Amino acid sequence: MNIVLKTRFMLWKKQLGSLLFWLVFPALATWFVVVQAASIQDETKVPIGIVVEEDTVLAEQLVSSIQETPHIRPVLLEERDALHQLEKHELDSVFIIQNRYEDNIQKGSRNKLIKSYQSDISLAYTPIRETVLSHVQQDYGRSKAAYVVQDMGEAYGVSSIWTWDELMERSKEIEEEQQLLEVDFSFADVDRQQVSEAEQLFQPWNVWALLTLLATFMLFDWIIKENRPALHPRFLFSKMGYRNYILYNLFLYTGLLWMMDLITMSLFAVVMEEPVSGGLILSLLSYRLMLNSCIFIFGKLFHSLYIYYTSSFAMVLFAALLSGALIPIDGLTRRWDWIQTLNPFDAFLSGSFLNVWVIIGFIAVAIWYGWKGKVDA
């Protein structure tokens, strides 16, 4: 094994640039894709201006509710600046939370709560206005319900009557605990589960699974480079046979790439706040063993680097289209169940350690090692 380590480190020293590039490529490229996707998604949100004329609890909560609304990018501005940006069409519309907003809500008045402005190209003004008004209506409804509860308490002689603020807070707690409204939707025959899965399009581990497949193909080109007929006679005069040498190198690459996978998992946890669990570590290990064993056998089928590289890129493209890592394949899996069973990415993407392709890869390596019933001397 020491001979293998010395030989491999000598070769790595000559190929240090290429080795380091493909080791860090999956993690860096995944981070770039996820960041760019998030940036594009943020840019597609409709920009609106929010002007707050009073500093009260209800006004702050209304702004917070608007900020949490999907597909809207609110910008807090002064009225003059907001209207100026609206004139330059930098904002789709402007909404002003007027002075005495909280007082009017407490009094049950619906007048002069929100003022809005739009331009001649405010394409999203109507749906955004309805969204803002729905949040205002929530505050108004809670306030009205609080007064009703207080009136009922006085009518029935309840000794401990809650204050208006306490009833407003309790109303919000009930809404959160009971989930009074849950929106469900579908497009044609696509159910909610499929829509949820479609939202996983640029999840870090999905992207990483494909990119690390490509990187492993590129790193395993040593199988073809060191399979030249001129090198085989040298092993006749050494203590280690050719197959043992190749197998030990497979173990060495597996250990190196597994350590890189663990580093990647740690980076994703810190940079992209991806959760780390024992199940993830096991599925990551299973995925790594599957990749290395199957790509090793795949590489043994080639003698030309050009054909190997071409076939590798074709395999990655094929995996991107039909594996479900990036593009949902629910329609195919519902029609043919065996596709999901044979999908090499399914176990990793679902967080499972059990992967039939790991067994297939191990059996293939064992058959290669013991081919013709003997091992090279």
Image: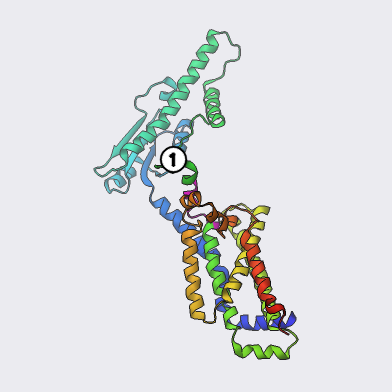
- Give the residue at the far left of this rendering: 120
The total of numbered circles placed on residues is: 1
**In this view of the protein, which residue sits in the foreground, 200 or 103?**
200
Coordinates of residue 140 in the picture (x, y in percent): 43, 25
Q: Amino acid at mark 1?
A: Thr
Residue visible at 51% across and 71% down in the picture:
312
Q: Is residue 138 above or below residue 21?
A: above
Coordinates of residue 340 in the picture (x, y in percent): 54, 54
Coordinates of residue 55 in the picture (x, y in percent): 45, 34
Rendered image quadrant of residue 2:
bottom right
Q: Quadrant of the N terminus?
A: bottom right
**In this view of the protein, which residue sits in the foreground, 67 or 317?**
317
Coordinates of residue 362 in the picture (x, y in percent): 66, 67
Q: Is residue 372 above or below residue 118?
A: below
Q: Is residue 7 above or below residue 202?
A: below
**Chain part drawn in magenta:** 196-205
Rendered image quadrant of residue 284:
bottom right
Residue that carries the numbered disc 1 in the rendered image: 69
Q: Quadrant of the C terminus?
A: bottom right
